[in-house]
Image (cartoon, rainbow, N blue to C red):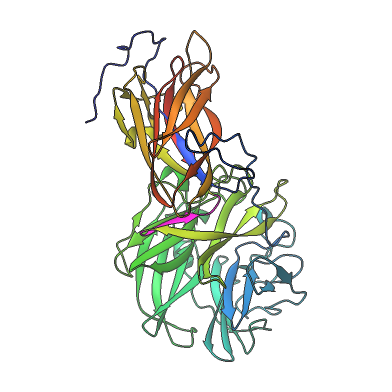
Amino acid sequence: MIQFRARFGSTGSAAVAVAVASVMLVPGLVAGALSSAAGLRTAAVAPAVIRPVIDQNFADPDVMKVGGTYYAYATNSDGRNIKWATSTDLVTWQVRESDALPALGAWVDPDWSFPPGGSGDHGVWAPEVFATGPRSFVMWYTAHDRASGKQCIGAATATAPGGPFQPQDTSLVCTPEIGGAIDASSYAENGRRYLLWKNDGNCCSQDTWLHLQQVSADGLRRTGPVTQLIKQSKPFEGTLVEAPTLWKHAGTYVLFYSANFFGNGSYVSGYATSASLRGPYTKAEKPLMTTDAFAGDVRGPGGQDIVTGPDGRDRIVFHGWNADFTYRAVYSQRLDWQGSRPIVAGAKIRYEAEDAAFTRANARYAAGGASNGVVVGGIDFADSRITFTVHVPRAGTYRLFSRYANGSDAGAAGHTLTVNGVDAGTVDYPVTGWDNWQISERSITLKAGDNLVAYAKGTNFAELDAIDVA
């Protein structure tokens, strides 16, 4: 049973006795042996650094498999309209010297440039390539329409995955009245192919919707009605959603997308789910990938694509800025699932303390600077507990990040920790002052599936905001 008590009701508490724990768990590799039964007490472990698989400018990666080879395509840079690369394992890539799309459609203004995109960015963005036959390939690409002055989507064809693709004379999607059209992607099922795209409303103070429409078998004509799927609606999305990718897992449609400003670390990836192709889609409350979720290893993760790896498991391929924010490199991470919930290897998953099961402790609302504005405190008694149910796809050692505030007059504080009922040592909190949320990091060992991670009264007093696991 969950019991609540007044914020200032605990004996010996300093100014605030309510503690909220924020923990984030992130799967990682750990060197060294784990201690046995009595504790699983592991020393702090240096986090595994997530490194790019294409460490050069290769933004908005789209990946297609033909035979045993993966082909990746990217937004214009380095003098090429569409860069491309090949791999057999999604890890080691060879970036090709040729331009997959050496000529643009007659509808395109080839002299237009996009300053925020960097040198050489002429607005040829976000290619999508798919096969319509053994020697028949279609590319959808975004470029600047000379007639309307907006970004629109065109099509091109080739007889080989590396091109050269020959453009169609007219655009495939051009909607200047709603800001233009960008970020085409495709989805196929039951012998039908569908086009997903974004209206570029953020160019002109309009909403940005992700759309779905069926196309002809050759991928060169739109047919049937257009369905609006989602638009920007959550604080983490800023003024836009874009870069749709549709994937079906265990009978559920999962719509991946990017959001917020692409040019810095605020860019994120999110997802929404639906039981039917045309929706309605329900967004996850929190983004899937953020700069913070990767502990700064990946800056502004987005432009994602999903592909099945050579081992038969799903992978997510996406871009992120380098440390100097001068180019967007490509990353390839394992994609696991908890039902219809995607889990990206190496990305923290947040568990809010107020959503955990807690006894002899209480939730404090309107907590300044706290995640979701709520924390859990009053963890001040021998029987006080906050218990998180943490799901991980694989057994192993993970990083546990406890988001805390410690305003104890007596100095450093701590909570005792158990994992699945076994003593796992302590989580230690230096003095921060109340409502000054900081992170205490350590490693824990988890089993595949659900784990019970419980915090109890230790030294002095602290509040918990959330935990992250990676």
Q: Position of residue 267 (x, y in %)?
A: 55, 49
Q: Give the total number of marks visible in the rendering.
A: 0
In terms of depth relative to the viewer, which is nearer, 117 or 328? Answer: 328
**Residue 328 horizontal side relative to residue 431, left or right:** right
Q: Position of residue 197 (x, y in %)?
A: 47, 67
Q: Position of residue 364 (x, y in %)?
A: 34, 23
**Residue 165 horizontal side relative to residue 177, left or right:** right
Picture residue at 74% right of the left edge, 58% below the top: 119
Is residue 22 positioned above or below 134 on the image?
above
Is residue 30 positioned above or below 305 on the image?
above
Picture residue at 64% right of the left edge, 51% below the top: 50
**Residue 469 horizontal side relative to residue 251, left or right:** right
Name the quadrant of the N terminus. top left
| Any part of residue 142 in sight | no
In terms of depth relative to the viewer, which is nearer, 224 or 458? Answer: 458
Furthest residue toward left: 1
| Any part of residue 465 in sight | yes
Q: Position of residue 340 (x, y in %)?
A: 36, 60
What segment carries the magenta color? 339-346
In terms of depth relative to the viewer, which is nearer, 344 or 230? Answer: 344
Q: Quick check: is 375 in the magenta stretch?
A: no
In terms of depth relative to the viewer, which is nearer, 318 or 124? Answer: 318
